[in-house]
Amino acid sequence: MVTSVVLPLALAIIMFTLGLGLKVDDFKRIFVFPRGVSIGMVNLILISPLLAFGIAELFNLSPLLAMGLVLLGASPGGTLANMFTHLAKGETALSITMTALSSVVAVITIPFFLDLANSHFGAGNSLDGINMWSIVLRTFLITILPLSLGLWVRTRSPERVEKIRPLLTRASLVLFVLVVIGAVISEFKLIEENFAKVAAAALTLNVAAMAISFTASKLGRLSDRQATAIALELGVHNATVAIVVAGMINDELMIPAAVYSAFMFITGGIFAKFMHSHNAEAAAEEGLAESGERVAT
């Protein structure tokens, strides 16, 4: 009941709330700032899941736990990443765009990397086969559909949505925490038995993803504010998606996402605080430059 009904419903509400915070311009931004969005998306949809593969091998995780870690690595960014980016004075618009795009392409990337992980780690016998088309359909129903509905509502009633969105955003964050707690409680015994190994793998993935994506962004000649947004998007996944998709297949797959969630609050917060003062100066300079341009015109 919890994994088949409550968790998918909770994720649908979270994704609907995410949609309320989006605008059509958030999707158009890929054409306005192609380099930043492209670097961020390559990190999200390719480097992150492949890094999860490597770390699962490094820590010799069991097939199901390894598959769960890859599932997490293939999951999109979320509103928490947007919030941390805002607090870090990073490029929030870029963060929102990556969250929107990665949430849409998750309907393809999640089943693809799940199937790849299932084949690579030999979890097939434990899972009795996975109907990937079923995963695609259900991922669509609990991510893209409510996200699109939220975007449609925002487009139809922008002023009303702006009034209620802060409250709904806070409620969705609380709901996210409850989903993680629920996953931990439901699999507490397995988490307790595997915590040391899973925790080390999850923390390594979290820190490595942020470090590699930040470095790649700087090598791609992006600003520190853009690099901050991309690093946080890689470090602060929408773990609810991973937990809910895992619940469709095998509850043990939830464990890496649940453990990872505990770390990403801490590491994301520390990184955001570290980058805040550095990015604040750049943000102020950009604001002054924009004001000067408006005065000049």
Image (cartoon, helix red, strand yellow):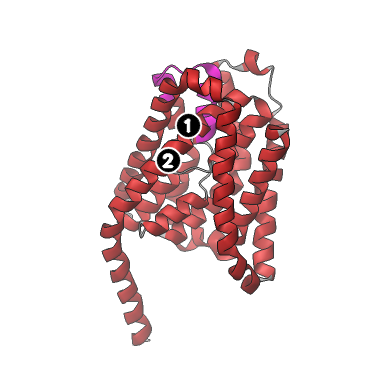
Q: Name the residue under label 1.
A: 259
Q: Residue at x 54, y 47 (%)?
A: 102
Q: Earlier in the sequence, mark 1 or mark 2?
A: 1
Q: Name the residue under label 2.
A: 264
Residue 78, above or below 260: below
Is residue 82 toward the left or the right of residue 270 in the image? right
Q: Separation of disc 1 and disc 2 at Cα?
A: 9 Å
SS of the residue under disc 2: helix
Secondary structure under the numbered disc 1 in the rendered image: helix
Name the quadrant of the N terminus: top right
Query: What is the x, y in percent for residue 297?
Result: 38, 86
At label 1, counting other C-alpha atoms closer than 10 Å, the crowd grade (few under 14, some 14-19, many 20 or more) is many
Magenta: predominant secondary structure element?
helix
Report whether residue 63 is seen: yes
Q: In this view, does 242 lie to the left or right of 8?
A: left
Q: Residue at x 48, y 33 (%)?
A: 49
- Which residue is rendered at x = 49% and y = 21% of the image? 192
Q: Given the current orientation, which residue lies at the most extreme top position?
A: 125
Q: Where is residue 254 in the image (x, y as percent from the top left)?
A: 57, 29
Q: What type is the residue that disc 2 sits on?
A: Met
**Quadrant in the rendering for residue 26:** bottom right
Q: Position of residue 249 (x, y in %)?
A: 66, 27
Looking at the rendering, the stretch of residues picked out in magenta corresponds to: 55-72
Q: In this view, does 273 lie above or below 7?
A: below
